[in-house]
Image (cartoon, rainbow, N blue to C red):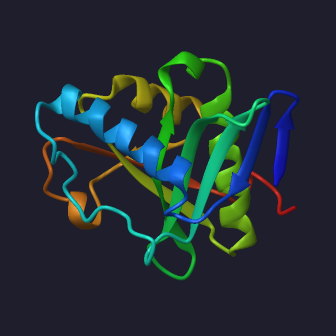
Amino acid sequence: MICVAADLRIEAVPFDHPDAVALREAQRVELTARYGTPDSEPGPAPTAADTTVFLLACDADGAAVGCGALRALGPDVGEVKRMYVVPARRRGGVASAVLAALEAAAVRLGWSVLKLETGTEQPDAMAFYERHGYHRIPGFGHYADSELSVCYERALSDAVSPA
């Protein structure tokens, strides 16, 4: 468990943990509304088999309020997946705490770079990642030819230190 604040707890859970499943479903519902289709993801959706770390953020009462995951792209590169915060807790530091915990986990795994894909209909996500030191890169992997994808990366060398 990673203690972030008195009212927030972040911990690694299995991909199929009920709260993880519920938050990923809430994210899909929101993305379907933004993009007008239930299948806006250009690449393969993460699975339990290819998710290296899944983090769950819970409030002081134990309610799940956010999540994020990592998927390996290579020996020292990972991808941020399934970042999501329930609407009532947005702009309160939950996403920043989850991202920091994901970056720390990536460093512990020996990764030096994190990449991610978000989309053209998620300007809030683009602004969030840019505030956290991620810079735009050309589309990579399954996102290379996607007109809806906006890709980012960050070198972790000075982002966090291993705990």
Is residue 27 positioned above or below 113 on the image? Answer: above
Quadrant the C terminus occupies: bottom right
Q: How many marks?
A: 0
Q: Nearer the viewer, residue 68 or 107?
A: 68
> In the figure, is residue 156 to the left or right of 126?
right
Q: Is residue 29 visible?
A: yes
At horizontal 74% and vertical 53% (from top left) the residue drawn is 158
Query: Where is residue 78 shown, x and y percent of the image?
Result: 51, 67
> In the figure, is residue 134 to the left or right of 32?
right
Query: Where is residue 44 shown, x and y percent of the image?
Result: 25, 65
Q: Is residue 159 visible?
A: no
Q: Nearer the viewer, residue 71 or 151?
A: 71
Q: Nearer the viewer, residue 13 or 120?
A: 13
At horizontal 54% and vertical 82% (from top left) the residue drawn is 75
Q: Nearer the viewer, residue 133 or 43?
A: 43
At horizontal 82% and vertical 58% (from top left) the residue drawn is 161
Is residue 46 positioned above or below 30 on the image? Answer: below
At horizontal 20% and vertical 34% (from top left) the residue drawn is 32
